[in-house]
Amino acid sequence: MTNKVESVDPSHTDDTKANQEFSGNIYIFHAFDIGDDIDLEKIDKSSKIKKQPLNLPNYFKNYHKPLQIELPHPHDTSSCISVKLSRFGAISLTYKIPFQETFEDLKETVNTIFDKYQEQSVSDANTLFKKIKKFIQQPKFFHQHTSYLLVQLNTNEQVQITSSELKERYGSSIASLVRFETEHLSEYQRNEILESDIGYYRGDLLIIDKESAFIYDEEYEETLYLFEYANVQQLELHYFDRVLDRQLNIIYEGNVKPLQWRAYLPFIGTTLSGDRIGELGRLKVEISVITEQLQNSVKLAGEPYFSEIYSRLVENLDLTGWQKGIEKKLYIIKDIRTVYQTKIDNIREDLLTVAIILLIFVELVVAFFK
């Protein structure tokens, strides 16, 4: 008796793969810089702003925690799950959009969803800005805006699938998804994206790219704060880089306002608050302080998995590159400030010398006539 082997139709396998629906959520993190400083204490005491409890992971330091509030009414969305205010003038909005569809359909819709919530975030942030404007120093809507998208896939599907099977069957779709592409990427690009995956447990999968990420993890909630935090950090670095560029362009183009004559007077000139040296010095101190706060708001020692996630975010968002660029421009400002200060000091010394000579001359004249 001959055993009969049933042939498997490859097209049937491809159809099953293409029609496999998955459920999960799309998280979109938006951040806006709206001013120099937000008085969180006054907002916390205000009866017009509704506060919400803030439960951050243990790796966030208490003294750098933002203030979490409710999005003021009226607003058109129920997808905004988190609104945070940072003391250094930043608003952070997090949106959660559930989905249940195939990867191929999700590739088509993720761009539309992202664009929709770009517009929605601007509207929501503007509504909030109007409510808290009086608590902001140098308010402006808005200096800078950054965003990041995370696709989270549920693990409690009826058909269980491991992370390795997910990469093998749907790797091309996942790679296209994190790049916001509707077509399949080249094999080189696909492999480069998929080979950068990380995970804590054997079945976990996390892929971090420049503008978005993909996560397949049952316990993913705590990682959301790292994505939000890195997006805010990116926002402030972009903003500071822009501010420094503007200041340096003013100096390079020779549009620096001349100092008042009183600035050259000993003792009196040092108390003037509007001089160029004072502005450059305050800018340097402000940027240095806020940059230090951003770098030291999280303590990831003893948290190897979170530390690796944050390292990947720093690498893909090029936070180190932005940081080095800012530091270089701060050094240039320091040198310019030194040149300004040296020039003023020399003029003050010359004025003192002239004053002393005049006093001696006056004494000689008085003595001669006596």
Image (spheres, grey):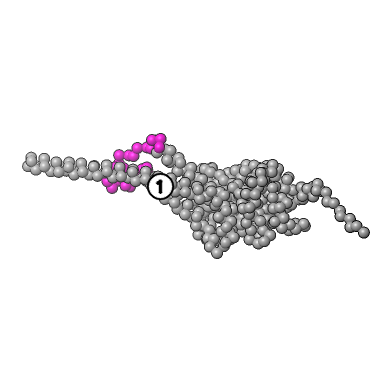
Q: According to the image, label 1 marks what residue? A: 331
Is 56 rendered above or below residue 336? below
Mark 1 crowd level (few <14, some 14–19, many ≥20, 10 Å Cα): few
Magenta-span inclusion, residue 273: yes
Classify residue 265 by image quadrant: top left
Magenta-colored span: 252-277
- Of residues 359 and 13, which is closer to you in this image? 13
Image quadrant containing the C terminus? top left
Q: Residue at x 62, y 43 (%)?
A: 118
Where residue 70 appears, x then y in whole percent?
Answer: 61, 52
The three-letter amino acid code for the residue at tag 1 is Tyr
Q: Is residue 227 left or right of residue 139?
A: right
Q: Is residue 167 visible?
A: yes
Magenta-span inclusion, residue 99: no
Q: Residue at x 50, y 55 (%)?
A: 295
- Of residues 47 and 242, which is closer to you in this image? 242
Where residue 328 appears, x then y in whole percent?
Answer: 43, 47
Q: Can you name the residue that lies furthest to the bottom here?
A: 302
Q: Can you name the residue that lies furthest to the front here?
A: 1
Image quadrant containing the N terminus? bottom right
Where residue 13 appears, x then y in whole percent?
Answer: 79, 50
Q: Is residue 349 left or right of residue 300?
A: left
- Of residues 268 and 321, which is closer to you in this image? 321
Q: Residue at x 54, y 60 (%)?
A: 300
